[in-house]
Image (cartoon, rainbow, N blue to C red):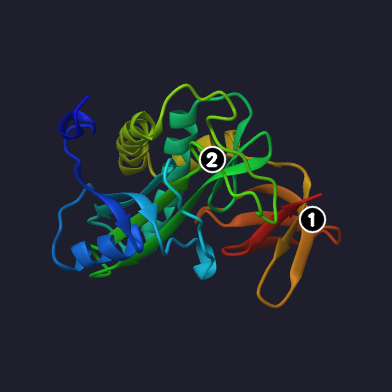
Amino acid sequence: MTETTLYPPGWSVQRFQVVGSTMDIARDLADHDAPDRTVVRADIQTGGRGRFGRQWVSEAGNLYMTLLLREDRPLADCAQLSFAAALALYDAIGLPDVTLKWPNDVLIGGKKTAGILLEAGGPSAAPWILIGMGVNVAHHPQDAPYPVTHVAQEAYPHGADTLCRSVLEGIDHWRGIWHKQGATSIHAAWLDKAHGRGQDIRVRLTSKEIVGRFETLDADGALVVLDKAGTRHSISAGDVFFA
């Protein structure tokens, strides 16, 4: 399979050996009118990052890419694309014990193997959305403060190129469902694969921590947690920890 036939029809891919961050390049492309379904992919990132600006170790052998999507709908609605991206990764990996951790991680056997980062800009009525993805394919960090793994270690039979194509096909699929059926459909699919639903969790916010049972998602995709006092909390941003 050549580089030109590696990706699904309709996707325009710019691939680099080494970049600072695929997200930074994709943002510049978005500001210069790059089309919907543009991908920036790199073999190595020297300045990769996750949520809250955390460093994302980006050595060769794994999958690092940022997708540029354009939507003719309000910016506030477009956060739902994070669930579409998670479902695309779930399907692409296709291994037993894959689960999805709110808000943006993919786990295998409870160990992190992929992360998703969303950024957006442009006109509020017709924004561009960047979906950054980092997937541990050939190896994983040895000094992470939480359990981690990589897909090859879990018997995924392909390399990063095949995984990339499968993810893009999955984005087309789940984005289409979101367009046709709305957020409720992708929330239901995500919840069916969610890690820890019905269990007690801790959610660390900026100024406090909420402890309670992970119940569901609300209409906006916020995490709904029922605490011991019977109060339901809808949480739009935070770090989730399991007992």
Q: What residue is rendered at 26% in x and 60% in y?
A: 26
Q: What residue is rendered at 57% in x and 63% in y?
A: 236
The residue carrying pointer 2 sits among few (fewer than 14), some (14 to 19) or many (20 or more) residues within 10 Å by Cα, namely: some
Residue type marked 1: Gly
The residue nearer to you, when weighing 123 against 119, is: 119
Horizontal placement of 230 versus 7: left or right? right
Which numbered dot is residue 10? Answer: none
Q: CA distance from mark 1 to mark 2?
A: 34 Å
Residue type marked 2: His
Q: Total label count?
A: 2
Q: Earlier in the sequence, mark 1 or mark 2?
A: 2
Q: Position of residue 210 (x, y in %)?
A: 76, 64
Q: Position of residue 164 (x, y in %)?
A: 35, 36
Q: Please tell me whether mark 1 sits on a helix, a strand or a loop.
A: strand
Q: What residue is rendered at 68% in x and 39% in y?
A: 110
Q: Position of residue 146 (x, y in %)?
A: 70, 52
Which residue lies under the disc numbered 1? Answer: 212
The residue nearer to you, when weighing 154 against 98, is: 154
Which residue lies under the disc numbered 2? Answer: 139
Which quadrant would the N terminus be assigned to in this image? top left
* Residue sitting at the far right: 228
The residue nearer to you, when weighing 184 against 80, is: 80
Q: Position of residue 98 (x, y in %)?
A: 59, 32
Horizontal placement of 228 versus 123: left or right? right
**Mark 1 or 2, closer to the camera:** 2
The residue carrying pointer 1 sits among few (fewer than 14), some (14 to 19) or many (20 or more) residues within 10 Å by Cα, namely: many
Q: Please tell me whether mark 2 sits on a helix, a strand or a loop.
A: loop
